Amino acid sequence: MSLWIWLLLACALAYAWKLMGYFVPARLLENPRMSRIAGTMTIGLLASLTVVNAAATGQSLAADARLGALAAAAIALALRAPFLVVVLAGAGAAALLRLAGWN
């Protein structure tokens, strides 16, 4: 089977999975516990994606400027900075670390 067939199959399965969401009863979605679980899962998935993208290159761990950028952004978040300041702090830290030679 070619790559295009696998890609089309994956698209069809993703669409079918999304379509299944319409069959979930409304009373289940209105439950406060379900809302809390969905919010927590979203935060957890986004945090894990961020850490994996910052600390890994392919199959190995990488200690480079991305970790410094993540630390700077985390400090800005801890200080309750606005989102734009958090992004600029991370980008600035990465730029400075790369300028210093930490690739």
Image (cartoon, rainbow, N blue to C red):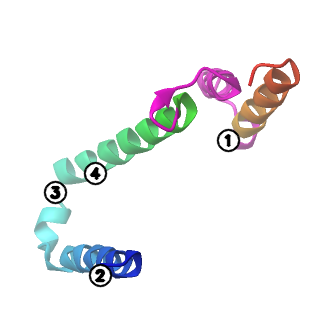
Identity of the amino acid at label 3?
Asn
Closer to the chain start, of discs 1 and 4, is 4
The percent position of residue 100, horizontal first and vertical second, equals 86, 17
Q: Which residue is mark 2?
A: 12
Q: Amino acid at mark 4?
A: Ala
Q: Mark 4 vs mark 3: which is more N-terminal?
A: 3
Task: Judge from the rendering whether residue 3 lies leftward or rightward of residue 29; answer left or right.
Answer: right
Between disc 2 and disc 3, whose residue precedes? 2
Q: Residue 48: x and y, percent?
A: 41, 36
Q: Nearer the viewer, mark 4 or mark 2?
A: 2
Q: Residue 4, image x and y in percent?
A: 40, 80
x, y percent for residue 65: 70, 25
Q: Label 4: which residue?
A: 38
Label 1, on which residue? 83
| Mark 2 vs mark 3, CA separation in Å | 30 Å
Q: CA distance from mark 4 to mark 2?
A: 24 Å
Disc 1 crowd, CA 10 A, few/some/many (<14, 14-19, 20+): few
